[in-house]
Image (cartoon, grey):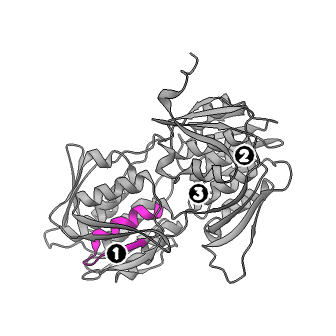
Amino acid sequence: MDAFVINGGNTLGGSIEINGSKNACLPLMAAALLGDQPITLHHVPRLADISNMLNLLERLGCSIDEHDSGDGRSITLYAEDESLSLAPYDIVRTMRASICVLGPMLAKRGEARVSMPGGCAIGDRPIDLHLRGLRALGAKITLDGGDVVARVPASGRLRGNTVFLGGAFGPTVLGTANVMSAATLAHGTTVIEAAACEPEVVDVARLLNSMGARIEGAGTPRITVHGVESLGGAEHRVIPDRIEAGTYVLAAAITGSRLRLTNYPADALIAAQDQFERMGVCVRAADGPDADPLRRTVDAWREAAVRPTTVSTQPHPGFPTDLQAQLMALACLADGNSVITERIYEQRFLHVAELSRMGASLFRQGSTVVVSGVEQLVGAPVMASDLRASASLVLAGLAAEGETVIRRVYHLDRGYEQMEQKLRTLGAKIERVDERDLAPVPG
């Protein structure tokens, strides 16, 4: 396995382009299972999760053509063999988002068998809302040998219905995409109540409508889907990754640097922008007033000392849970006490112990962490536990005095394309090494 070695304390500078959104790409790719013609996605990032999804779609009968275009990496997907309906455990176990093939495959092929998904160890994230939604559309669902088996009703087609997708911790993004995708080929009209409002859901709806679907209300808590007989092909540019964008804003802030970010999804980061400003972080447009609000060019920097904050993660348009760990890294250097509450995934605090090893002053009580700012973080050997925790440790390492070694950075590769290379172009002293070449961690 790989590790990062970071020598911190360096000021960064330069420009970086934000990649296409991982969380949008995965359900967008699964939408290929619905169409009778190829779909082409532009600005697709090179990530482990994307590679795993490509492997899965190939196993499900899709042909794949990858090529570089004037808009980054492009992928054309075409479901040529519709006789296959098994999403096997050896691929699905690598990422939770594999479940997003369930709805499209069920609706188009009449049957789907998907192993129970794996992914980051950040607490219980059941798929019951996905299954509830598909059952409401008439699917017959059973569990067999660790696989979810779903079949359309005897009529041979799903039926439109009113579906409620609210859960204990708010709406489900992948569940909304799954049910919305399945409903495009259902007979009649489907109304999804308590739908997720995230920009990634809007992006999936935009692609599906380009393929011939009739979806209204994406981006609001009520989505209406009028079923159609068939879907065709389309070309689609993936929205920028708002979590990657927020992470690099925080990289500028925690190192006291100024960075230019292009392809910046400002319109999808309003709640995060509010928190940035509260903490003394500036994000200012560097392009014209007519620029696409989802693809801005901005400059990011910190004006003075980091100010403390109080924040709770919430479903969109609230502060995103996927930026909680990175914001905590910055709060470790604030002049005062910050209070960070996690309301989406209660166990998403695996980074707390590792930040503490670097000199952070953190006190956790249930779903809340009180962060008492310190003057300086100190480099230390730490262990990455999940994707966003990994990013927070990288940020801390960039700011820390001395050397930080982050093990198990394969988590990071699931959501950030060549992060160490991008940071090096900005002036960071960061290297990827083989863990076997590192000295053992003292007992």
Asked whether residue 401 is drawn in magenta, I would say: no
Secondary structure at numbered mark 2: helix
- Gap between marks 1 and 2, in whole Å? 40 Å
Image quadrant occupied by the N terminus: top left
- Which is more N-terminal, label 2 or label 3? 3
> Number of labelled discs?
3
**Residue 214's image quarter?**
bottom left
Q: Which residue is mark 1?
A: 39
User: Front-most of 112 and 415?
Assistant: 415
Left or right of residue 184, residue 375 in this image: right
Residue 344 vertical placement versus 393 (above, below): below
**Which one is closest to the eye, mark 1 or mark 2?**
1
Question: Which callout, 1 or 2, points at the residue further toward the start of the chain?
Answer: 1
Amino acid at pointer 2: Leu
**Is 227 located above or below residue 196 in the figure?**
below
Q: Position of residue 191 (x, y in %)?
A: 39, 74
Percent from the top left, x then y, of residue 305? 85, 48
- The answer to whether residue 200 is left or right of residue 232 is right
- Which residue is most to the right? 304
Q: Which of label 3 and label 2 is nearer to you?
A: 3
Name the residue tied to disc 2.
330
Alpha-carbon distance for marks 1 and 3? Answer: 25 Å
| Mark 1 residue element | strand
Magenta span: 23-41
Give residue 89's position: percent from left, percent from top. 26, 46
Q: Residue at x 45, y 43 (%)?
A: 120
- Residue underneath mark 3: 244
